[in-house]
Amino acid sequence: MAYLFLAISIASELVGTSMLKASEGFTKLYPTLFTIVAFVCSFFFISLTMKTIPLNVTYAIWSGVGTVATVLISVLVWKEKISIGSVVGIALIVIGVVVLNMFGPGHGGTDKLAN
C-alpha cells in the first residue's frame, strides 16, 4: 500500500509542477488553485508513505521519478529543450535511486555507517 501512496504522491507532484508552470507566476486563478491542491495532496500521500518506507528511500524515489517525469512533461507538453548534460544528470539520478533501493535500509543494507 505504501508504494501506491508513493505513486499517488508522485502523480500529484507532477500535476502540481505542471500547473505551477501554467499559473504563470500565480497570475492565473485555476492553475494556481490546482497547484495548491496538488501539492497538498502530494505531501499528504508522501507522509503516509513514510510510515512504512524509510525517508531516504521514499524521498529518493519521489524526487528521482518526479525529476525524470517532469523533464518528460517539460519536453512533451511545454516544448522545452533538453541538453546532453541534462540527460546525463537525469541518468545519474536514476542510478542513485536504483542503488538506494537495492542496498539501502530495509533491503539488506545497514542502518548505520561503518566507523
Image (tube, rainbow, N blue to C red):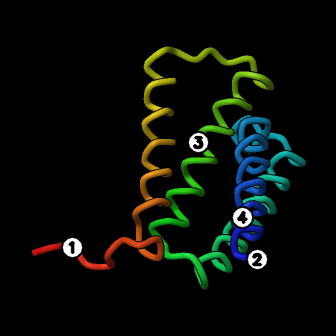
Question: How many neighbours does mark 1 have within 10 angstroms: few (below 14), some (14-19), or many (20 or more)?
Answer: few
Q: Residue at x 43, y 48 (%)?
A: 96
Q: Is residue 9 left or right of residue 60?
A: right
Nearer the camera: disc 1 or disc 3: 1
Badge 1 amino acid: Leu
Q: CA distance from mark 2 to mark 1?
A: 29 Å
Q: Earlier in the sequence, mark 2 or mark 4?
A: 2
**Between 32 and 60, the one nearer to me in the picture:** 60
Q: Earlier in the sequence, mark 2 or mark 1?
A: 2
Q: Which residue is mark 3?
A: 67
Q: Quadrant of the N terminus?
A: bottom right
Furthest-front residue in this view: 108
Q: Which residue is mark 1?
A: 113
Q: Earlier in the sequence, mark 2 or mark 3?
A: 2
| On screen, residue 82 above or below 38 | above
Pointers 1 and 3 in contact (C-beta within 8 Å):
no
Residue 67 screen position, x and y as percent: 58, 42
Q: Which residue is mark 2?
A: 1
Q: Residue at x 70, y 22 (%)?
A: 75
Furthest-left residue in this view: 115
Q: CA distance from mark 4 to mark 3?
A: 14 Å
